[in-house]
Amino acid sequence: GVIIDAKQGYIVTNNHVVSGGQEIAVKLSDGRALPAQLVGSDSLTDVALLRVKADKLTQIEFGDSSRLRVGDSVVAIGNPFGLGGTVTSGIVSALGRSGLNIEGYEDFIQTDASINPGNSGGALMTLDGRLAGLNTAILAPSGGNVGIGFAVPSNMIKAVVAQLIQHGRVERGQLGVSIQDLTPDLAQAMRVSQTGGAVVAAVSAGSPAEKAGLKPRDVIVAVNNQSIRDSAELRNTIGLTPVGTEVQLKLLRDGKPMAVTATIGRAPAPAPQAQPS
């Protein structure tokens, strides 16, 4: 876990680290063991927020994960195989990894810093000591590190934590559209020169998208001036935007640029799933 607010005692970790726990204890590097309260958790991003009552805590400062570049140096902190506090170094291998079926909302930082079982919930840090991400998962055919680890980016963590503090859960936003990636073949068929974006395949009746005037075949290329690479990035951006927020959508319609304003609606809660016994 990572202390993100020393005054309030907030600690962020992975949902899968604390899920199902009846009691949670936090052990600090100075040897103190503290009971922790689960403020809230979100399985779809694998982020959980804890709170402890203690003084003389030291917090980490958030970095801006949108400023990371492939090749940047990072260090991973954790407790691999129960050995205790361990630091490993590496680089950012890739950004925006999705489609791994690890979480519902994926925008992973990939790194070759050694991440092993027990590193989950630990900090992935830039060399200036700021939080770049939260170590979450590895591809490990042998059960150990092979140089492919993944971290939830800090900007996603901040968005989730803000909602967990306010609501105890994440209230996901939605536009009410079905979307797909703008592939080269699709761009050619639609006579669009844009190389990135999300294509609107369908618009739900009565949805925020319909009220904003979105139509099928529109290509959404930016949300609040933040460029959209593909459908996964649009889903992440809208899903973590607070319900009721107005956003400006830049899009291409019949190849011509335009902008519309939409008010984010509330996505339906996911249906409960049976858990393995």
Image (tube, helix red, strand yellow):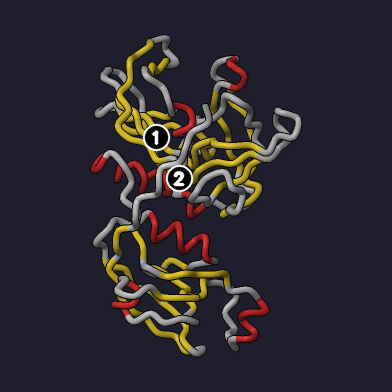
Q: Position of residue 36 (x, y in %)?
A: 33, 20
| Front-most of residues 231 and 193 | 231
Name the residue rendered at 71%, 37% in the picture. 147
Tell which tag, 1 or 2, sits nearer the viewer: 2
Question: How many residues crowd around disc 1 within 10 Å: few (fewer than 14), some, or many (20 or more)?
Answer: many
Q: Position of residue 261 (x, y in %)?
A: 30, 75
| Front-most of residues 42 and 79 | 42
Q: Position of residue 7 (x, y in %)?
A: 25, 28
Name the residue rendered at 45%, 16% in the picture. 29
In the rendered image, which quarter contains the N terminus? Answer: top left
Residue wearing tag 1: 48
Name the residue rendered at 29%, 63% in the picture. 265
**What amino acid is found at the position of numbered circle 2 in the picture?**
Leu
- Give yes or no for contact between labels 1 and 2 (Cβ–Cβ under 8 Å): no
Determine whether, in the image, residue 131 is placed left or right of residue 172: right
Q: Position of residue 246 (x, y in %)?
A: 27, 67
From this viewpoint, which residue is outermost toward the right? Answer: 142
Determine whether, in the image, residue 128 is placed left or right of residue 3: right
Please tell me whether residue 116 is drawn above or below residue 130 in the rendered image. above
| Element marked by disc 2 | loop
Residue wearing tag 2: 44
Please tell me whether residue 81 is drawn above or below residue 60 in the rendered image. above
**What amino acid is found at the position of numbered circle 1 in the picture?**
Ala
